[in-house]
């Protein structure tokens, strides 16, 4: 399903964030380090955008499938309710990710988690933006 594909893109985004950090640690003095870092940033943003689009259309398809409140997903009322629902879910997810980030910082492992969490928070933020568009 599209929801699972979106989750895969989120995991891929986190994987690229960890890979980027590893490459930054190992190839700090190499001539191609800026090129690899830029390639990782492009992949990270691409996967994050794919995650956001997959989640957006998964929510729309779920709305159509289960006929929420008897409203057609294309109506203004339904779009506003869908945007509110996605914003609420996004708030909960971002709060949870912030708590995880705080725990990682307390354990001294902020370097490994901060970039991955920031990429997912950025993707969720794009999702909220898409839903209100």
Image: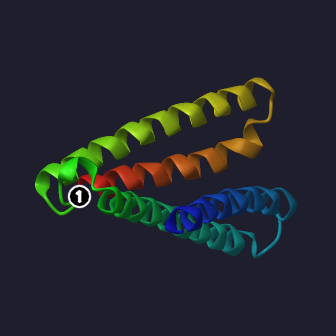
The picture places residue 100, in percent across and down from the top left corner, at 66, 32
Q: Quadrant of residue 76?
A: bottom left
Name the quadrant of the C terminus.
bottom left
Placement of 101 over or under 121, stated as above or below: above
- Give whichever of 118, 62 is nearer the camera: 62
Helix or strand or loop: what does disc 1 sit on? loop
* The quarter of the displayed image where residue 130 is located: bottom left
Give whichever of 65, 114 is nearer the camera: 65
Q: Is residue 130 left or right of residue 17?
A: left
Where in the figure is residue 126, as x and y percent of width and height? 40, 55
User: On the picture, is 124 further left or further right than 77?
Assistant: right
Indicate the colouring scheme: rainbow
How many marks the image carries: the answer is 1
- In this view, the residue in front, 44 or 85, is 85
Q: Residue furthest top?
A: 106
Spot occupied by residue 94 in the image (x, y as percentages of width and height): 51, 37
Residue at (57, 46) in percent of width and height: 118
Closer-to-camera residue (18/67): 67
Rendered location of residue 68, percent (x, y): 27, 50
Q: Residue 33's quadrant in the figure?
A: bottom right
Q: Which residue is mark 1?
A: 133
């Amino acid at each position: 399903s599209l929801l699972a594909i979106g989750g895969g893109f989120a995991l891929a985004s986190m994987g690229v964030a960890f890979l980027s950090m590893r490459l930054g640690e190992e190839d700090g003095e190499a001539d191609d380090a800026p090129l690899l870092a830029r390639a990782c940033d492009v992949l990270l943003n691409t996967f994050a955008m794919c995650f956001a689009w997959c989640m957006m259309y998964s929510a729309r398809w779920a709305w159509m499938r289960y006929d929420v409140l008897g409203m057609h997903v294309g109506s203004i009322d339904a779009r506003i309710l869908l945007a509110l629902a996605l914003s609420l879910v996004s708030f909960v997810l971002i709060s949870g990710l912030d708590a995880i980030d705080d725990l990682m910082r307390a354990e001294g492992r902020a370097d490994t988690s901060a970039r991955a969490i920031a990429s997912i928070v950025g993707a969720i933020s794009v999702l909220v933006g898409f839903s209100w568009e």
